[in-house]
Image: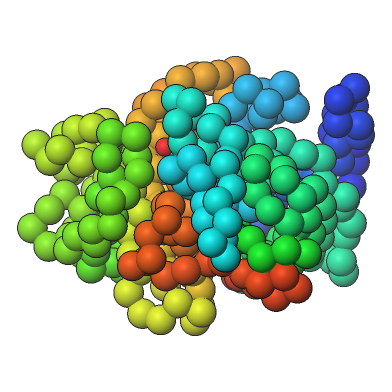
Amino acid sequence: MSIAVSKYAQSQEYGTVYAYDITMGDFSAKILSFGATWQSMTVPGKDGRRRDVLLGFDTLEGLLGGDYEGMIVGRYANRLSGSVTINGENFDLEKNENGVTCLHSAKEFSFANWASRTVGEDTVELIHYSPDGASGFPGRVEATVRYTLTADGAMKIEYRAVSDKDTVLNFTNHAYFNLSGQGDILTHTMKINAAAYVPVDKLDIPWGEIRPVENTAFDFRTAKPLGQDMNAPDEQIQNARGYDHNFCLDGEAGTLREAAVLRSEEDGITMTVLTDNPGIQMYTGNFLDMPGKGGVHMGAYAGVALETQYYPDTPNRPEFPQCTFKAGEEYHSVTEYRFSVDK
Ligand code: GAL
């Protein structure tokens, strides 16, 4: 068990970016100060060969031109329909998508170089302050993220944030997983413990419906290959060219519980996602198209993101579980990605 820190990049705009390599037996992970990014996760397969199960880049430039690979997203992960109303006051947000919607709070927390330090031999702590008014949101927010690689092969991510004004807080990690470390995820199986999901309009904004998954392509209550219904004649699937939806997790939000299980039979690797969040966005990388690590092209379905979160556009949807926090009130959330290897 060890952590090594090194200089990853020097940027005129962002300063020195640090990399933390955490090693724990057969598992290792790299965390970057820029974007508080989970840059790599090395896991042995049943053949004993180690593979990096995260999509991403070798350089800061790659990350800057990417699709949030491994980054922390906040203060509001996912989409908001252009504005939020807090205590009756309307706040116009930065409309970084189609000039209409606010995706991942524009660059607020992802495109920032966080302050960072090690805690013990297994944890990296990152802190970033975002000013009042950033991307249009009220309140100066201090966010702290802790990544811990546990002895049994889990990456535990703990999020804390506090604002000096009432605001919305909803953080996630945007890692894309591919348990083979190459190719696509169409033959990986997925299980999601959700009896319902949130359908969205053409701009990926919900209208408030929570739709049962039963008899739809969205039923992952029993594990099935991700590719199985990827082309289903379902308007939601067709519009997104695959999955890009929030699943409403079973069980009680606020309690750490199993959310999803991703597995590659071929590699003998299983990843179990646990979270205390009410939802999880599954995005199957439908529009990925860029060079990644080692210059290898990342195309559609090269990886799958499992973003634990509150539902999209929650502040404008009173029927969804709410995430408006009072000034000084702490937002706290935990998500774990547990890796296990067939013996
Ligand atoms: C996901 C989102 C996708 C896409 C991606 C970033 O969280 O659901 O629609 O925007 O982020 O490219």
Residue depicted at x 87% and y 69%:
120
Q: Is residue 123 left or right of residue 87?
A: right
Quadrant of the drawing holding the N terminus: bottom right
Using the image as rendered, state which of residue 171 and residue 298 is in the foreground: 171
The image shows residue 32, relative to residue 323, as above or below, that is above
Q: Residue at x 33, y 67 (%)?
A: 319
* Residue 193 horizontal/vertical position (percent): 31, 68
| Image location of residue 200, percent across then percent down | 28, 45
Q: Residue at x 75, y 73 (%)?
A: 328
Position of residue 64 in the picture relative to residue 277 (left or right): right
Q: Quadrant of residue 106?
A: top right
Q: How far across and down, in percent of the image, does residue 215 sit?
A: 8, 58
- Residue 247 in view here: yes
Observer-nearest of 209 and 30: 209
Identity of the residue drawn at 57% across and 65% down: 87
Residue 232 visible at all: no
| Frontmost residue, 110 versus 10 | 110
The coloring applied to the image is rainbow
Name the spot of residue 227 as percent of width and height, x first. Answer: 23, 40
Q: Horizontal placement of 46 versus 192: left or right?
A: right
